Image: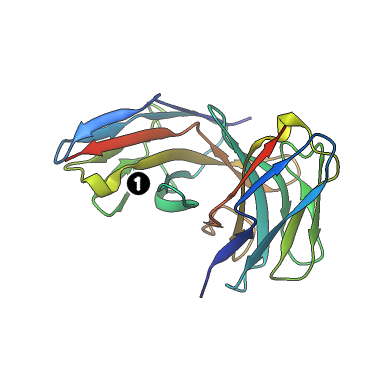
């Protein structure tokens, strides 16, 4: 089945630093790709998504580009804020043999931003 | 508009005890899901309900049962809790089943089984 590999954290940055969180995937076919964010004490929220190769998803200053040639969907932000401290999950769609289209999540990467 | 709500927020059980985790959504969504989140493993799907009146197994259904009580509510039951079920449980909903539809998550229930 499809799978997602994320860089281990925590990623520790100072405010205004550049952020990259790596995500690579293994999939048959052409899955959709997602980044979800989980703030402390809350459930996951969709941050951005891309549905086909070379698509760029963007939201709240975060970007990720669907790279089919490198099977990657790295998350980037030019200048992080303390309020970006959270756990970030990369995910992809997986169409199982029952026809149910589910999300497959990576293990999550914790980001800590200090003032 | 509360979104997805879950009760309780925290629970401690002894091995062999039973309990039901409650989930409700007020967004008129058709599809609902239960996930568990374990360190180093990301989220894994336990059960889902594509629409009212239907439920199906996900990746890790053993030891759990679910009930789609009505369109709003989707409960998860542990009949005989085991330490391996210590986890954080998230309920989610989406307008329809399929990854084209954004899933909205509740705040989670942290369950410890001793």
Residue B41, by quadrant, is top right
> Where is residue A29 drawn, in percent x and y?
56, 36
Lateral position of residue B10 relative to residue A12, left or right: right
Residue A89, by quadrant, is top left
Residue A74 visible (yes or no): no
Lateral position of residue A64 relative to residue A103, left or right: left
**Quadrant placement of the C terminus of chain B:** top right
Which residue is pictured at 82% across the width and 38% down the height?
B63
Report the front residue among B86 and B104. Answer: B86
Which residue is pictured at 74% across the width and 39% down the height?
A97
> Where is residue B87 drawn, in percent x and y?
63, 37
Crowding at mark 1 (Cα within 10 Å: few <14, some 14-19, many 20+): some
Which residue is pictured at 31% across the width and 42% down the height?
A85
Chain to which mark 1 belongs: A
Report the front residue among A2 and B81. Answer: B81
* Image: B90 above or below B13: below
Residue A110 visible (yes or no): yes
Which residue is pictured at 45% across the width and 53% down the height?
A45
Residue labelled with disc 1: A55
Query: Farthest residue in the left direction?
Result: A16
Residue B106, by quadrant, is bottom right
> Where is residue A49 drawn, in percent x and y?
41, 49
Lateral position of residue A95 relative to residue A29, left or right: right
Q: Could you tell me how many numbered marks the image carries? A: 1
Report the front residue among B58 and B13. Answer: B13
Identify the element where label 1 is drawn. Answer: loop
* Image: B75 above or below B27: above
> Where is residue A47 drawn, in percent x and y?
38, 51
């Amino acid at each position: 089945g499809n799978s997602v590999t994320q860089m281990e954290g925590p990623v520790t940055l100072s405010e205004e630093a550049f952020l990259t969180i790596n995500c690579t995937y293994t999939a048959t076919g052409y899955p959709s790709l997602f980044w979800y964010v989980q703030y402390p004490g809350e459930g996951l929220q969709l941050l951005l998504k891309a549905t086909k190769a070379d698509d760029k998803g963007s939201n709240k200053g975060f970007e990720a580009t669907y790279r089919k040639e490198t099977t990657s969907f790295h998350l980037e932000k030019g200048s992080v804020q303390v309020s970006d401290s959270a756990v970030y999950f990369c995910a992809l769609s997986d169409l199982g043999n029952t026809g149910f289209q589910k999300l497959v999540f990576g293990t999550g990467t914790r980001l800590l931003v200090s003032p | 508009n509360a979104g997805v709500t879950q009760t309780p927020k925290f629970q401690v059980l002894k091995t062999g005890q039973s309990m039901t985790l409650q989930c409700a959504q007020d967004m008129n969504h058709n599809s609902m899901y239960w996930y568990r989140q374990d360190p180093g493993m990301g989220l894994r799907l336990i059960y889902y309900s594509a629409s009212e009146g239907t439920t199906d197994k996900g990746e890790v259904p053993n030891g759990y049962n679910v009930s789609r009580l009505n369109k709003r509510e989707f409960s998860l039951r542990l009949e005989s809790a085991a330490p391996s079920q210590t986890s954080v449980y998230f309920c989610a909903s989406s307008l329809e089943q399929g990854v084209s539809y954004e899933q909205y998550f509740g705040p989670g229930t942290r369950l410890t089984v001793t």
